[in-house]
């Protein structure tokens, strides 16, 4: 690794979430528990939906894909974070940083699209129940899922291309716990305006677009439920929508804050904490909020595990 201004670095140093050893120990335990819950919850959902024929319907098809995406999302970031919490020198090669960024963006952008697809599925089920089986066919479900992964791949290619095409030879210390475009842009030794505009444009497509569809879908669901459901039915729907909105606020709110605001040359501790919500927390919450509270999933669990 060179020290002269025009020497390009072959590795980066990640500062992580804290430099205090005692705090790092606590963080290691906390994030290890979160990761184990994430892996257990999402694998359980995938197994239950795959083995129980009653769950072979569009809603659970999308949930299975969401669980797989969450596994990829979390595994791209957390294992390396845990390792760095145990070592003094927190380094990552330029190639490793690039690979992590590519897969992180693919999984994250795909999840954003899938959450919108799932809200549309619920909108059709509640607001157009008589046409649900003709609209949400198996072919349409597969196409929507492929489209979600395709959009995630496109966003990843654009963001990583614009980010990695910049030169990095002034410093190699990333004030973050993993490699993502906003953190790397702060190290760039040349003008970052084009990269920032490209990332902002992708944010409009993959964050504001899906969020708008989600808000539209749930608004129509709530209006429909108020008109036709009983008091108990309304409470159940509002409870479900409320828990889903928690995920929406955590995921989209924190991601929009990170990717769609003017870039500053410094990354403070608050920025890193906010990124924890969309990169770590939501992957753990999704299986519990979207699936494990569901009556059908609970019955499938009892059937598979004999309880």
Image (cartoon, rainbow, N blue to C red):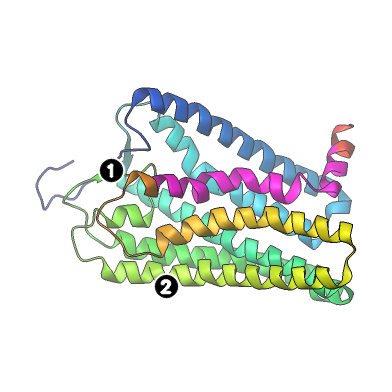
- The quadrant holding residue 167 is bottom left
Residue 12, label in figure: 1
Residue 279 place in picture, x, y as percent? 50, 48
- Total numbered labels: 2
Give SS at disc 1.
strand
Residue 287 visible, this angle: yes
Residue 3, label in figure: none
Separation (CA) of disc 2 from disc 1: 27 Å
Which span is picked out in magenta? 272-301
Residue 201, label in figure: 2
Q: Quadrant of the C terminus?
A: top right
Residue 106 visible, this angle: no
Q: In this view, does 12 lie to the left or right of 297?
A: left
Local crowd size for mark 1, using a 10 Å CA cut-off: few (<14), some (14–19), many (≥20): many
Q: Residue placed at 42% from the left, 72% from the top?
A: 201
- The quadrant holding residue 92 is top left
Q: Residue placed at 69% from the left, 56% from the top?
A: 242
Q: Is residue 298 magenta?
A: yes
Q: In this view, does 247 lie to the left or right of 140?
A: left
Residue 76 place in picture, x, y as percent? 49, 45
Give SS at disc 2.
helix
Residue 115 place in picture, x, y as percent? 64, 61
Q: Residue reaching furthest left?
A: 4
Q: In which quarter of the image is the N terminus?
A: top left
Q: Does the magenta stretch include residue 198?
A: no
Q: In this view, does 88 lie to the left or right of 43?
A: left
Residue 55 or 26: which is nearer the viewer?
26
Q: Residue placed at 39% from the left, 53% from the top?
A: 180
Local crowd size for mark 2, using a 10 Å CA cut-off: few (<14), some (14–19), many (≥20): some
Q: Is the magenta region chiefly helix, strand or loop?
A: helix
Q: Residue placed at 18% from the left, 50% from the top?
A: 8
């Amino acid at each position: 690794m060179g020290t002269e201004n025009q020497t390009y670095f072959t590795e980066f140093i990640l500062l992580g979430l804290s430099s205090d050893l005692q705090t790092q120990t606590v963080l290691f335990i906390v994030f290890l528990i979160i990761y184990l819950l994430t892996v257990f919850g999402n694998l359980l959902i995938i197994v239950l939906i795959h083995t129980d024929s009653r769950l072979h319907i569009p809603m659970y098809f999308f949930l299975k894909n969401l669980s797989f995406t969450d596994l990829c999302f979390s595994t791209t970031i957390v294992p390396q974070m845990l390792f760095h919490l145990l070592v003094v020198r927190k380094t990552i090669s330029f190639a490793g940083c690039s690979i992590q960024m590519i897969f992180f963006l693919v999984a994250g952008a795909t999840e954003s699209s899938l959450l919108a697809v799932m809200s549309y599925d619920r909108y059709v089920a509640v607001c157009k129940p008589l046409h649900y089986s003709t609209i949400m066919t198996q072919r349409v479900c597969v196409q929507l899922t492929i489209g979600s992964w395709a959009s995630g791949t496109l966003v990843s290619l654009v963001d990583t291309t614009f980010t990695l095409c910049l030169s990095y030879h002034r410093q190699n210390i990333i004030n973050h716990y993993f490699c993502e475009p906003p953190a790397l842009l702060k190290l760039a030794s040349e003008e970052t305006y084009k990269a920032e505009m490209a990332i902002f444009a992708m944010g409009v497509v993959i964050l504001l677009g899906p969020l708008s569809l989600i808000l539209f879908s749930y608004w129509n669901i709530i209006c429909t439920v108020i008109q036709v459901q009983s008091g108990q039915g309304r409470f159940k729907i509002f409870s479900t929508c409320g828990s889903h909105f928690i995920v929406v606020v955590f995921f989209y709110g924190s991601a929009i804050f990170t990717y769609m605001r003017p870039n500053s040359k410094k990354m403070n501790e608050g920025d890193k904490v906010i990124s924890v919500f969309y990169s770590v927390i939501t992957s753990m919450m999704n299986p519990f909020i979207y699936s494990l509270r569901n009556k059908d999933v609970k019955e499938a669990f009892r059937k598979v595990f004999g309880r």
